[in-house]
């Protein structure tokens, strides 16, 4: 497992991102996927709450979840949100009883100014296949995808394709899908679409958002919060 300090300055954080960037694997290294975990972080004042919910795949039934809490120690700096959210996400992942085959983050992967969004950052640190699925664009340009579910257009920055804009429901705002680690872009889009049922966001992220907001799931292995 790759590690680094989290108690750093913004400039040191950028240096860490630049050091991690060459470690990102953009090829598909997924084996058989039996479990998919959604990762989301919420904030209550100066406390960050990270929820990780593991769902059986393809049934998308929750089998395990954990909620961890940590005081926020890094300032809000666009492009460096992984340093606000990373410590509590790592704490949650370490306490999971089930080792998921794939992580889907509510956030960016390579669709980031330095190609190091939280899905990529954490994916590299834990060396696990990961996908970024964000509700809004952080960088890059794109046309609008067609209105039908499954429609996609490329998210580009210059000549580089950094993600895909994906319509997960007919006529509903698209999501921004990008590689995290050890997954290619086509595979990332396929898993996001297969994890979307009735809603815009994939079920793993929806469950994680609910748990991060304080909800208890009836069908999981609940574990107590820790500071």
Image (cartoon, rainbow, N blue to C red):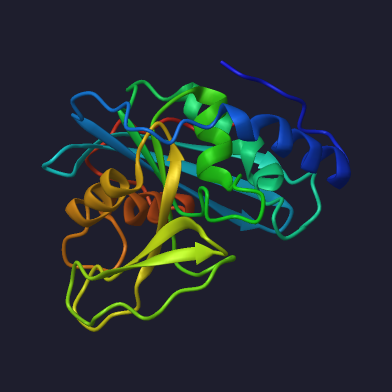
Q: Which quarter of the rendering shows the N terminus?
A: top right
Q: Nearer the viewer, residue 24 or 124?
A: 24
The structure residue drawn at horizontal position 18% and vertical position 25%, both measured from the top left corner, is: 32
Q: Residue furthest top?
A: 1
Q: Position of residue 83 (x, y in %)?
A: 71, 43
Q: Is residue 192 left or right of residue 22?
A: left
Tell me if I can see residue 172 in this picture. Answer: yes
Q: Visible in this render: residue 91?
A: no
Dividing the picture into quarters, in which one does residue 223 lie?
Answer: top left
The answer to whether 157 is drawn above or below residue 27 in the figure is below
Question: Where 83 sits versus 145, above or below?
Answer: above
Quarter of the figure with residue 56? top left
Residue furthest out toward the front: 159
Q: Is residue 217 left or right of residue 129?
A: left
- The image position of residue 186, as x and y in percent, is 28, 48
Q: Is residue 171 above or below residue 165?
A: below
Front position in the image: 55 or 58? 58
Task: Please state, as top left, top right, bottom left or bottom right, where the C terminus lies in the image.
Answer: top right
Residue at position x 55%, y 67% from top? 140
204 left or right of 77?
left
Image coordinates for residue 116, horizontal then vertical, percent: 61, 44
């Amino acid at each position: 497992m790759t590690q680094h300090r989290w108690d750093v300055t913004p400039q040191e954080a950028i240096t860490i991102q630049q050091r991690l960037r060459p470690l990102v694997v953009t090829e598909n290294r997924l084996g058989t996927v039996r479990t998919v975990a959604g990762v989301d972080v919420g904030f209550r004042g100066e406390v960050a709450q990270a929820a990780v919910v593991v769902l059986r795949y393809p049934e998308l039934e929750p089998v395990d979840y954990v909620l961890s809490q940590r005081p926020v120690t890094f300032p809000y700096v666009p492009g460096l949100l992984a340093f606000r959210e990373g410590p509590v996400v790592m704490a949650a992942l370490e306490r999971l009883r089930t080792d998921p085959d794939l992580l889907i983050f509510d956030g960016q992967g390579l669709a980031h100014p330095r190609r190091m969004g939280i899905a990529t950052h954490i994916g590299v640190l834990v060396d696990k296949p990961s996908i970024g699925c964000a509700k809004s664009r952080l960088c890059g340009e794109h046309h609008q995808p067609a209105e039908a579910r499954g429609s996609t257009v490329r998210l580009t920055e210059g000549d580089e394709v950094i993600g895909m804009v994906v319509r997960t429901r007919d006529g509903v705002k698209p999501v921004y899908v990008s590689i995290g680690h050890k997954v290619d872009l086509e595979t990332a889009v396929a898993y996001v679409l297969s994890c979307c049922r009735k809603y815009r966001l994939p079920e793993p992220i929806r469950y994680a958002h609910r748990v991060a907001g304080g909800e208890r799931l009836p069908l999981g292995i609940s574990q107590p919060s820790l500071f």
